[in-house]
Amino acid sequence: MKTAFIVSAMLSLSTAAFGQPYAAVKVAYAAADVPLGSPFNGVIDDNAPALGVDVGFGFGRRWAVEVGAARYGGLDGSGTPCVAGDVCSPVVRPIGGNDTTLYHAALVPRITAGDARFFARVGYYRANIDANIDLPGADDFHEDGLMLGVGVRWYFDDPWSISLEATRFDDNIRQLAVGFGWGLRRLEE
């Protein structure tokens, strides 16, 4: 009897703690304003579509943790590319096709209202930027920092949902996304 009680309690605890997994695929439109140092010596300043995925686990009634990634189409920029230490040309030229992949980890507070779930995101992001310049030392650039976001997810047929969300990654990237997801949710008691 004691063993059955312990097993039952452990299963209930794990369901309460990790019983709300979710995943979403999203299409976004982003505006980027990312300054880059040598050898790019310029800024990526463009708008582009993105495809992304988020995966998370809800715990308790109001909280979740989430990780995600998004791939942005070729963001254009301008700069004066030259090797570090060389004298750079003063002529600024366009540099197109800079592919960017962004990763994030976030804490997600949530509030449920009927079939809708309002949420915020506070976390850390890292952007890997593959600059389209052909110079020695022109490896990928990395930007990282704080991300903040808000959104709403509507469960039109449990466990299926659609979402609308806005996210800001420091001063560098802003995006508006529409997502389609699957996720278990704990209904308010």
Image (cartoon, rainbow, N blue to C red):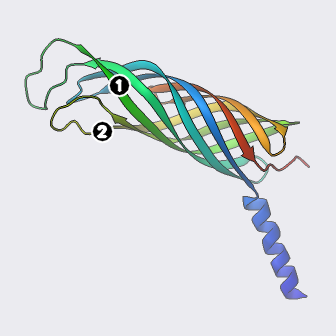
Q: Is residue 137 left or right of residue 140?
A: left
Q: Position of residue 27 (x, y in %)?
A: 60, 30
Q: Is residue 177 left or right of residue 63?
A: left
Q: Is residue 14 left or right of residue 157?
A: left
Q: Position of residue 44 (x, y in %)?
A: 35, 22
Q: Secondary structure at mark 1?
A: strand
Q: Residue at x 7, y 22 (%)?
A: 87
Q: Earlier in the sequence, mark 2 or mark 1?
A: 1
Query: Which amino acid lies under the numbered mark 2 shown in the image of this protein?
Result: Asp
Q: Secondary structure at mark 2?
A: loop
Between circles 2 and 1, the one closer to the viewer is: 1
- Reading the image, the residue beneath label 1 is 97
Q: Residue at x 70, y 42 (%)?
A: 109
Rendered view: 177 above or below 111 = above
Q: Quadrant of residue 137?
A: top left
- Reading the image, the residue beneath label 2 is 140
Q: Quadrant of residue 172?
A: top left
Q: Position of residue 62 (x, y in %)?
A: 76, 46
Q: Residue at x 22, y 35 (%)?
A: 138
Instruction: Give the alpha-carbon distance from disc 2 to disc 1, as whole Å.
Output: 13 Å
- Label total for image: 2
Label at residue 44: none
Density class for disc 1 (Cα within 10 Å; few <14, some 14-19, many ≥20) is some
Q: Residue at x 38, y 31 (%)?
A: 99
Report the quarter where the N terminus lies.
bottom right
Q: Position of residue 164 (x, y in %)?
A: 69, 28
Foreground residue among 101 and 147? 101
Query: Which amino acid lies under the numbered mark 1 shown in the image of this protein?
Result: Gly
